[in-house]
Amino acid sequence: MKPVEAPADEMAVVQPEPRTEDTLDKVARKFKTQADLWKRVATNTDKLRLDAIAERDRAIAERDEARAIIAARREKAKLNLRQFKGKQGAAEQEAA
């Protein structure tokens, strides 16, 4: 079998355009100082961290709520079983 070769233009690696001084000036104007940049990064990081904590708390609350519902259903099933056994025992005593 003969290996299939791609055309040369498809194999060429696309090089990103280098940042120009204009682009760097835009970034520099956006963040006047390095401290402003780091302050913004820290703020975004704090927001993400707080969002993650809030999501975790919501998941824990949902889990606890589901556990409470399951526990209530178990208790109700146990009560129903006791009542059924009680009625069944009373019916057996009447039959005897």
Image (tube, helix red, strand yellow):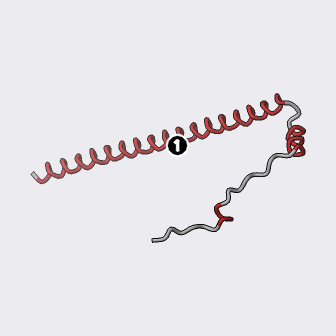
Foreground: 96 or 57? 57
Q: Answer with the quarter of the image where residue 23 lies.
A: top right
Residue type highlighted by circle 1: Glu
Q: Answer with the quarter of the image where residue 95 lies.
A: bottom left
Mark 1, secondary structure of its residue = helix
- Counting from the top left corner in percent of width and height, residue 46 is at 70, 33
Foreground: 56 or 6? 6
Describe residue 71's horizontal placement relative to residue 19 as left or right. Answer: left
Q: Residue at x 41, y 44 (%)?
A: 70
- Counting from the top left corner in percent of width and height, residue 73 is at 39, 46
Can you identify the residue that label 1 sits on? 62
Residue farthest left in this picture: 96
Q: Answer with the quarter of the image where residue 56 lies.
A: top right
Number of numbered discs on residues: 1
Dot 1: within a 10 Å radius of its alpha carbon, few (fewer than 14), some, or many (20 or more) residues?
Answer: few
- Counting from the top left corner in percent of width and height, residue 31 is at 86, 36
Q: Residue at x 64, y 61 (%)?
A: 11
Describe residue 57's horizontal placement relative to residue 95 as left or right. Answer: right
Look at the image and tell me in which quarter the N terminus lies.
Answer: bottom left
